Image: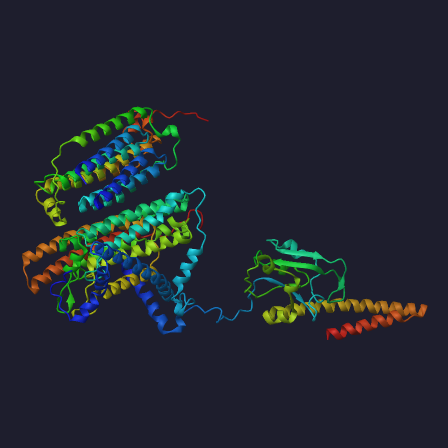
Amino acid sequence: MNLNAGWASTGWTSTLDQIFVLVQHRVAELFPPVLQPWVAMILGVVGIVAVFPAIFALTTVLERKGLGRMQNRLGPNRVGPYGILQPMADAIKSLTKEDIIPRSADAVVHFLAPVVLVVAIFLGYAVLPVGRNMVLMPIDAGILFFFAIGASTELSIFMAGWSSRNKYSLLGAMRAVAQMISYEVPLLLSAVVAIMMTGSLSPEAIVAAQGGFSGVLPHWYVFTPWGFAGFALFVVAALAETNRSPFDLPEGESELVAGYFTEYSGFKFALFFLGEYLGMMSIAGYGITLFLGGWGAPFSFLAFIPSWAWFFGKLFLAIFFFIWLRGTLPRLRQDQLMNFAWKFMLPMSLLNLLVAAAWRFLGEWLGAGVGAEAIRWLACAAVLGGTYVLLGRAMLRRQKIGPRSYRYAE
Amino acid sequence: MMHAAFFLTFAVLTLAGAVAAALLRNLVHCALSLTVTFAGLALLYLSLGAEFVGLTQVLVYIGAVAILVVFAILLTRGSGSLPRQMLSSSGWRVGWLAAVAVGFVLVAALRDAPFAQSQGNAPVVSVKEIGQALMGPFALPLEIVGVLLTVALIGAVIVAMPEKPMLENPVLKNQMPEKQGGAE
Amino acid sequence: MTLTAYLIVAAMLFALGLGIALTRRNAILVLIGIELMLNAANLNLIAFWRFGAHAEPMTGMLFALFSIAVAAAEASVGLGLVIAWFRHARTTDLDEMTRMKG
Amino acid sequence: MLGEGILKGLAETAKNFAGSFVSEERLTTVEYPEQRLPQIENTRDFPFLVYDGDDAMAGLRCVSCQICEKECPPKCIYITKSADKKPDYVGKAQFYPTRFDIDVSVCMSCQICVEVCPFEAIKMDTEFELSTEDRFGGLILDRHKLAKSNEYYHQIHPTEAAEVDARLAEEKAKVEAKAKAAAEAAAAKAAADAAAKGTADATAKAAESAAKSAEGQA
């Protein structure tokens, strides 16, 4: 494995940076050469299957505690010190619960749905670079792979909702699928700007393209006008894609009980829960890869900290942001959701593509230099900001509600 | 050896999905087994080294077409199991005979056909080269596909749009018979 | 594996798709059959791309990609038509679609 | 501008989040089993039976009139009337319940039994930690579990209990005044009779009981 060129650091920091890769190689070398790639692959898979569910367990308790703090409560604090063992209690509870399959349910599809969902979401981690040289399956079209896998989770959600033979489940599934299809378009289009600028679909190449520093600041895409707009659109679409608040209509408790997993209990319910959080983490991971420099350090003087630490630090920040939004925003209505997807997100992401292209060619025409750079920056930011304000005003105008009139009272 | 095992697994998956789609009575089950076929085909493409096509297959067929089929089934109230006589059209024996005959002829012809086969490795085509080809020599087909997809999008929306009630349609309004009065 | 094996799989898939399209009464299932036939053709294209003596390495693959795009368009319009017909006649049964008018 | 409200909301929750670590006063919840909020005086959940004196079963005010049983909307009260009678707080002989069960898992805490009771015998309790593993043994409270002293009633609802006591005393006084008047009339009559018959037993008895009740009232 070749380390990135231009990455200079002392011996022990590079060892620490590559510690997991080195361990993988050492363990694989214990086996005969024929088996070595397989052993390395299995070790990588085991790593992912161990680490991300562990983060999921931690996230559930941290989310509940964080939400509690945002609502001036303490949150769970009974199981273990500061309630940190709550996931254990939850796991034991969900494993010992009775596994209920409704009598009229389609048993096979009902069983397959959570399995397919979790498998598909785990597959999405295969091409996610979680550190320097730390990607399970370095394929050329990694981002396409992720979106393809993400698209196939919709089917398992439909399977869950349809096979339960429950109107709430079916409605929840239909809402979820409609929402995911609608927001997949802006999600893909907002990711395309990063792909365009890198000229590659490979996550590693995208991270590498964001490497390097000017002064102390990194070359992350989020620091450009199109990158920032793309990142914001990606975050909103990711929230909708993972059914997180404020886009959690598919599981709106007040009207749909629990949406598509109403009829699931015990371990299968836990699988859905796991799938939801793993999906959130993987989409956050790709957002980090595409716009936030992946495993790169945010300042040049902090580059000695291992790359995987940066990745997981950013991942935790992203998860915290998701929790923060959940603690803040109320749920949208279905018509608001669709309006927002097709009348705001889609035009904005299309415009963003145009701006990214313009950025590229303006850079060639204007040449280098601080003045040219500033003009390019301001022009792109002005186009995006102006459109944002105009489209936003149009969105808000539609929402204005007149004084309520009564037909019989008064 | 390994490759043969993979090929056999994927081929069996593909064909089993297609057979299930042909025989199952519940339309949603048919659609789901169709998805299995699509997934098997994607795996076959991947095993052939056509990474980009395989992933596109997953994105378009599993992510979009299968969902579309499922939505269409639910919108047309077809999610229940059909009675046996509703399953196949009246001439199903002839239909299957024709299909099996076509399959038999194709397989027999292919088995002995002398194709010039290169035994080398899969041609390496990076995503970048695909992009350059699409923007270079294949720009015109790309544009045409773009136009086609736009037309299909608009056409599908218009076709599936709720029809106006007859009274609001100016053409049909004049052809409406006079209202029969005196109904009590 | 040899080219012939892939081609035989594609031929069997095509025959199955043809069988579905010819025999099933539900319009959506007929569309599914047509999709299967298109996919069988795609498998042929990719198999020839992989094993053929390729002067131009890109063409087979791009042809398959365009074919996928066209199939997607076909599916969306076809299903839109089925839904429109269902709204009109409350059935998706092809044997009952006997009226030319409307 | 679109998104302004989102930013304001995010700032608010961030303030809450950070503030909850800084000041304990922001936290609106209490750590329940260890900390408890003081109960307000009108707290009430399930009914109990009041008794006077020391012996719970003897001092029950309930006369087994079964009005509460009939009025109870979810029908969670089960009463069996006694065959014999025993004197109540005014000394009048009354029936008493040999069985008085309340199924608190059915009870909806509507307090109608309290409102309809003519004898101030059933009142609302404040005890809420009733959870148990035994549905029928633990949640159907019999008369032994339900009986609680008047002192306890004073403890949990002082104002209301004082009102009830005053009302009962007034009633008792009225009854006694009536009894006294009756006794006096009887005494006068008895005296007249005694004069005639020469037996003063009845007079002495009536006078004695009147004195005793006057003492009790004081």
Position of residue A384 measured from the top left corner of the image (x, y, whole percent):
18, 56
Q: Which of the 4 image quadrants contains residue B38?
A: top left
Q: Relative to residue A239, is residue B125 drawn left or right?
A: left
Q: Which residue sits at x=40%, y=59%?
A: A91
Give the percent coordinates (x, y) of residue D192: 91, 69
Q: Is residue A121 above or below residue D167?
A: above
Which residue is at 79% across, 74% downward? D211
Quarter occupied by residue D100:
bottom right
Of residues D188 and B92, the one drawn nearer to the viewer in this rendering: B92
Residue plotted at (65% across, 57% down): D68
A382, A187: nearer the viewer: A187
In the image, residue A75 above or below residue A115: below
Which residue occupies the foreground of this view, A229 or B170?
Answer: A229
Q: How is the image coloured?
A: rainbow
Q: Position of residue A234 (x, y in %)?
A: 23, 55
**How many discs mark residues in the rendered view?**
0
Q: Is residue A2 left or right of residue C11?
A: left
Can residue A174 be seen in the rendering of this structure?
no
Q: Position of residue D99 (x, y in %)?
A: 68, 59
The reply, left or right, for residue A68 in relation to residue D84 is left
- In the picture provided, is D204 more to the left or to the right than A68? right
| Quadrant hosting residue A30 | bottom left
Residue situated in front as seen by the camera: B101 or C56: B101
